[in-house]
Amino acid sequence: MFSGIPIICDQCGSRMHKVPTMPSVNWNMPKPSQGGLHPLVEQLNATHAERADAFARKKEAHVKRTESENDTAG
């Protein structure tokens, strides 16, 4: 779990470990709980349909290519 040399308490002799902490977040804009979204998230949301269509085209091309390679290999 934690690497390194164990730390022993000087007072009681128990083994100690460092507790991970979370860094503070500076939003500089409305928080998500207040309905705010980061501009990059807004861009991803706006281009979702276009990216989904592009993925579907790439997947279809891949499937066709794979099928033709399997047909010629057999």
Image (cartoon, grey):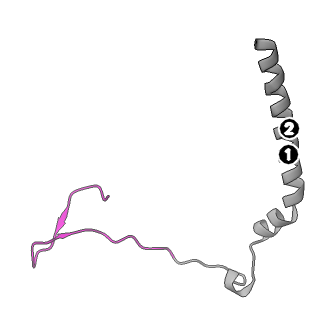
Q: Report which quarter residue 32 is drawn in.
A: bottom right
Q: Is residue 39 above or below residue 34?
A: above
Residue toward you, 53 or 36? 53
Q: Report which quarter residue 16 is drawn in.
A: bottom left
Q: Would you say the residues marked 2 and 1 are in contact, meaning their CB atoms lie under 8 Å apart?
A: yes
Would you name the residue on which mark 1 appears? 56
Q: Position of residue 56 (x, y in %)?
A: 85, 45
Task: Give me the residue at 83% from left, 46% from top.
Answer: 55
Task: Give me the residue at 85% from left, 37% from top.
Answer: 60
Give the class, few, some or many, for how many residues have Cα within 10 Å of label 1's Cα (few <14, many ≥20): few
Task: Give me the residue at 39% from left, 70% from top.
Answer: 20
Drawn side of residue 19 relative to residue 71, left or right = left
Question: Hey, what amino acid is under mark 1?
Answer: Ala
Would you name the residue on which mark 2 appears? 60
Residue toward you, 9 or 52? 52
Q: Position of residue 23 (x, y in %)?
A: 50, 74
Q: Position of residue 71 (x, y in %)?
A: 81, 17
